[in-house]
Image (cartoon, grey):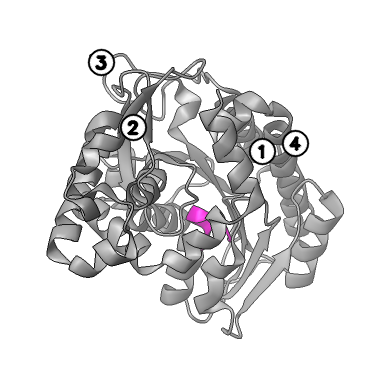
Amino acid sequence: MRRVLITGGAGFLGANFTHYWLARHSGDRVVVFDALTYAGNRTSLAAVEANPNFRFVHGDLRNAEAVETVMGEEDIDLVVHFAAETHVDRSIDDPDAFVTTNVVGTHNLLRAARSLWHNRPARDTAPRFHHVSTDEVYGALRPEEPPFTEATAYAPSSPYAASKAAADHLVRAYHRTYGLPTTISNCSNCFGPYQYPEKLIPLVIIHLLGGRPLPLYGDGGQVRDWLHAADHCRGVALAIERGVPGQTYNLGGANERRNLETVRMLCNLVDEAFAGDPALGRRFPDAPAANRKESTSLITFVPDRPGHDRRYAVEAAKARCELGFDPGMDFNAGLRETLDWYLTNEPWWNAILDDDRYRSWIAAQYSR
């Protein structure tokens, strides 16, 4: 039995991974450690709360004592580190929170793991610290350039990306200096259930249903490589189970799309859904599709943000060869599945829309 600590487990990727791991490792003890910031949602874990092998701890990585306490109490031997401030726009407005959470918080976790595992007697399962990072640490790609590899030099553009790059370097340093058994995964843009609607895909879905404008930066030509959350969970699990300590693995979906193309695909899927289910028009009367209009009519171009990277894409050949990673979710099918999840789970995201923190943020976006 492993004793697993999942940081940020009430967030988008952390919640998906918590469900994924418990479904496949029912005998493991799983502890979620989450600060429940604006993007943390305890209800995302409702399906596992009754599991006797599950525990939720409300705690902040910036509190070193709290981190050390939960690591020691639970005698953790696997850390899966998702917790992070992740939104680029917010990092431009308030970089301090990104430095304290992503850099200092990661260091607190590394230090606690080193202290706990130092000279601990050997067990059947060796300890592991897995750090979840992003493709944004590599900077931007020109249209003609090949995707990022694990050997690509870091060149972060935003305070968010810089804070994640710093965390990556700390994880590597703890492996090289102290022998901490670490692995890192750098993933491309993820989407799927439980994603907070500040990110492109859930924001577009919810705005389409409410008949609100779909803001696209610049000309909408920014290119992103999309990876479904289920594929990401599988990639992280493979890195934990098969990855070599000290190594980094890029997890990409091989689904490069311009943002404008992605938004148009979602518009078409929503139009199709409304055409096939008249009840949707009654549930969401403000949606263009409920009024025999095309959803694309809501697309609105807004001024680009500072330092906006034009293209990201990662090459997952190393993860494919060494881990057996192969993303299986077709992009269009993944978008359709994600739309279905948001249609089915309206109470989950309605609670977010009613939150003053979200109201303030969305108001600020439209006042720029």
> Crowdedness of circle 1 by 10 Å Cα count: few (<14), some, many (20+)?
many
Q: Is residue 344 above or below residue 48?
A: above
Going by the numbered disc 1, the residue's amino acid type is: Asn
CB contact under 8 Å: marks 1 and 4: yes
Residue 312, percent from left and from top: 36, 27
Q: How far is mark 1 from mark 2, CA to CA?
A: 22 Å
Q: Give the residue at x 67% y 57%.
A: 36
Q: Give the residue at x 62% y 29%.
A: 91
CB contact under 8 Å: marks 4 and 3: no
Indicate the quadrant containing the C terminus: top left, top right, bottom left or bottom right: top right
Q: Is residue 138 above or below residue 252?
A: above
Q: Earlier in the sequence, mark 2 or mark 3?
A: 3
State the residue position of label 3: 143
Please name which of the two marks, 4 or 2, marks the residue nearer to the observer: 4
Going by the numbered disc 3, the residue's amino acid type is: Pro
Q: How far is mark 2 from mark 3, CA to CA?
A: 13 Å
- Left-right relation of 6 to 345: right
92 or 323: nearer the viewer: 92
State the residue position of label 2: 314
Q: Secondary structure at mark 2?
A: loop
Indicate the quadrant containing the N terminus: top left, top right, bottom left or bottom right: bottom right
Residue 351, percent from left and from top: 55, 62
Tell me the magenta residue range.
10-15
Going by the numbered disc 2, the residue's amino acid type is: Val
State the residue position of label 1: 102
Going by the numbered disc 4, the residue's amino acid type is: Thr
State the residue position of label 4: 100
45 or 199: nearer the viewer: 199
